[in-house]
Image (tube, helix red, strand yellow):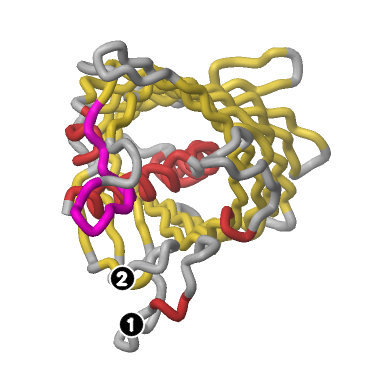
Amino acid sequence: MLKKVLTITLSALCIASQAQAEIFDQEASVMSMADGKKNAWSMTFFSIASVSNMKSGSAQDKEPANVTGRMIDTYDYFSLNYRIDQDSKASLRVPVLLNSAGINEYGDQIPSKGSLSDIHFVYSNYDLGYIGDIDVGGAAKWYLPTSQYSQAAKTIAKFRFEGYFEWQFGRFSSLEYVVKPDIYIQSQTAYYNPDGIPTYDDGTFMRDPRSTTKQYALEHYLQLNLDINKYFTFQTKSGFAEDWYYSSAAEDLDGSHVTRCRLGVSLEVRPMRGLNFTLGIQNETPLNSYRGQDVTFFKPDNNQYTLMTNAYVF
């Protein structure tokens, strides 16, 4: 049971982290609904749903006859916001992880399930000033270890800092550099993690079920925004996500540094003020050798399809 819970949690946390730049931009858009209102309090809704391609070797003929479709992962939250001034706000977010019943990317049948993710506090400032012609914004986030994954790893807290550097060119287009470092406060350097590890007939694991805990992470990329008209924006994203892990002398485990290349395209749709959607596809390629496999770009295995929703509630 824990193995399936951690699999679902890790998948949903992954899709949430991949969407942060679009979240920041779309938040600014939906928060404009509060402009001119006397009440400093507001609420917004965010959701990202994802389906990943089947992994190689996970033949779809494994699917039971009574299963009609793929599993869909979602990461959703309502954000309670307090407007500090015209350009900044403080927020409390209580996210949940949900998945529909169906077949995951490994060919396994998964039942529908929901769980709490990491509750977090956010300070956002959409206008920190200018560096020449570059508009600067940012955010700081404090995550509590309320998800099942964080509790299994006995994480104490996570702090994320986000910087957004946007250069406008032409009338409706921009190029944005995004950088997001994470700092993890851990109570231990290793933990027991049987997630996704196959077993022999006698129940023993085929490889070590212990894992080291994460120490730092960094995501940074360039995003190109091309406004087609007032309803549609075409976006491309290219960059890297990196993770650093502790070593553990007690468990005799080495530390590691993992780098992944992320490339994606998306289409943002704004049907009305205070509501927008983004349809996207992203390819994520590990740049380290993984389980003896060579690095291969643009593998269909590494594609993920997403639908992101941002809405102003009140």
Mark 1, secondary structure of its residue: loop
Residue on which the image places disc 2 = 109
The magenta segment: 191-204
Taking the magenta stretch, the answer to whether it contains residue 192 is yes
Where is residue 60 drawn, in percent x and y? 47, 76
Marks 1/2: CA distance?
Answer: 8 Å
Taking the magenta stretch, the answer to whether it contains residue 10 is no
Where 296 sits versus 257, above or below?
below
From where the camera sits, is residue 279 visible?
yes
Q: Nearer the viewer, residue 95 or 225?
A: 95
Query: For the residue marked with disc 2, what is the amino acid?
Result: Gln
Q: Quadrant location of the N terminus? A: bottom left
Position of 117 with respect to 183 (left or right) is: left
Q: Nearer the viewer, residue 87 or 23?
A: 23
Position of 82 with respect to 297 (left or right) is: left
Q: Which is the main secondary structure of the residues drawn in magenta?
A: loop
Position of 222 with respect to 178 (left or right) is: right
> Which residue is rendered at x = 49% and y = 60% of the image?
52
Whether the residues at callouts 1 and 2 have beta carbons within 8 Å, the answer is yes
The circle drawn on residue 64 is 1
